[in-house]
């Protein structure tokens, strides 16, 4: 069995030497324990540091290291896609893992064994997040809860650390959408699923490439790609508001004919702001979906490969 480990890298010069060393050892271990041949495919997502230099050096040194360099920074999900699209022609199964080794690479052996037993997609699930900040843990929990309420199939605490067999990769490649939220799309594929559990570690080196703003935009992407629930919610809210408005009109008229209009000033002002807020939110949510339609309709390529080693 031939396995590819796909690793998206964006400005990871600080951690790459360590990553290559750890994964190099892991490859030997996988061979001993499962008899599978493993190779690495590093995807340089348009890094501006020495990441590509390091990848090409490693590829010259080790026969099991391969690299592709994207022409521009396209984001984690697109980089992963580029790696999977390249790997699909060369392997029986693929594992995706982050360059910073926050996910426990040793469970890959368990993943391989499960695939050998006939499973197709093995999800890596985080047990503990001790090393993450309180803020990251809290926002992640809130996100997974929200995501599960719009898409009940979401695997809690599973990010993009998973193993997929060749046939499930081919199935995934048939999804044409540009708004990628892989962890949820993969779940829709079906096939035979397996899970491995591990503790999430601290980043080996370098800093997170996912600041809060990127995380927020990623979450909004995830939810809006998988559900129109926010649109429905806003519609119901709008209907409820209209009902309230009717009562307000009657109330205002009665007040008017009793000659006490000036008193209505407070309620008017309050409701004006309230309704204004709701409308703006509604327009915003609708806008997000329209924005998605816009990017999908353009059908722009996800990435370009500038170089291969
Ligand atoms: N990454 C990428 N392109 C980007 C941002 C991140 O390929 O535009 C990669 C990054 O190199 C790492 C993985 O995606 O391998 C996850 O990023 P990071 O560890 O910074 O995210 P966090 O674990 O903090 O959520
Ligand atoms: Mg990380």
Image (tube, rainbow, N blue to C red):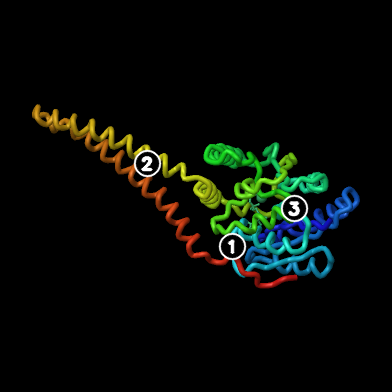
What residue appears at the point 71 percent right and 52 percent down from the top-left corner?
97
Q: Residues within 10 Å of mark 1 (few under 14, many from 20)?
A: some
**Horizontal placement of 14 versus 244: left or right?**
right
Q: Residue furthest right?
A: 32
**Does the numbered disc 3 mark a residue whose Cβ is under 8 Å from ligand 1?**
no
How far apart, in angstroms, are the residues tagged by discs 3 and 2?
42 Å
At a point 44% along the width and 56% down the height, the residue shown is 291
* Secondary-structure class at tag 2: helix
> Toward which corner of the image does residue 249 lie, by quadrant?
top left
Q: Quadrant of the N terminus?
A: bottom right
Q: Looking at the picture, how far across and down is residue 161, in whole percent?
A: 70, 49
Which is more N-terminal, label 2 or label 3? Answer: 3
- Residue 285: x and y, percent? 41, 48
Circle 2 residues within 10 Å: few <14, some 14–19, many ≥20: few
Q: Secondary structure at mark 3?
A: strand
Q: Which residue is mark 3?
A: 165
Please name which of the two marks, 1 or 2, marks the residue nearer to the observer.
2
Quarter of the image for the C terminus: give it: bottom right
Per the model, the C-alpha gap separating discs 1 and 2 is 34 Å
Q: Which residue is mark 2?
A: 235
Q: Quadrant of residue 132?
A: top right
Whether the residue carrying mark 1 lies under 8 Å from ligand 1 is answered with yes
| Relative to 173, residue 247 above or below | above
């Amino acid at each position: 069995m031939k396995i590819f480990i796909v690793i998206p890298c964006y400005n990871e010069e600080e951690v790459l030497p360590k990553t290559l060393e750890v994964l190099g050892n892991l490859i030997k271990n996988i061979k001993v324990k499962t008899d599978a041949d493993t190779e690495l495919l590093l995807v340089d997502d348009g890094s501006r540091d020495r990441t590509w230099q390091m990848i090409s050096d490693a590829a010259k040194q080790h026969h099991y290291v391969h690299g592709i360099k994207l022409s521009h920074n396209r984001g984690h999900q697109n980089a992963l896609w580029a790696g999977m699209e390249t790997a699909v022609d060369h392997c029986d199964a693929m594992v995706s893992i982050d360059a910073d080794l926050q996910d426990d690479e040793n469970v890959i052996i368990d993943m391989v064994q499960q695939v050998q037993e006939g499973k197709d997609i093995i999800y890596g699930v985080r047990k503990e997040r001790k090393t993450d900040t309180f803020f990251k843990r809290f926002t992640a929990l809130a996100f997974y809860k929200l995501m599960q309420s719009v898409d009940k199939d979401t695997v809690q605490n599973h990010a993009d650390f998973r193993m997929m067999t060749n046939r499930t990769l081919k199935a995934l490649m048939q999804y044409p959408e540009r708004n990628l939220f892989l962890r949820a799309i993969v779940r829709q594929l079906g096939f035979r699923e397996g899970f491995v559990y591990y503790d999430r570690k601290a980043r080996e080196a370098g800093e997170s490439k996912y600041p809060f703003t990127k995380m927020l935009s990623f979450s909004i992407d995830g939810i809006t790609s998988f559900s129109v629930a926010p649109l429905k919610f806003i519609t119901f809210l709008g209907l409820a508001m209209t009902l309230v408005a009717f009562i307000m009109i009657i109330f205002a008229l009665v007040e008017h004919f009793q000659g006490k209009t000036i008193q209505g000033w407070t309620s008017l002002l309050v409701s004006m702001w309230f309704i204004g807020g709701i409308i703006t939110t509604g327009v915003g949510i609708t806008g997000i979906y329209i924005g998605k339609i816009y990017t999908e309709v353009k059908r722009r390529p996800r990435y370009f490969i500038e170089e291969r080693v």
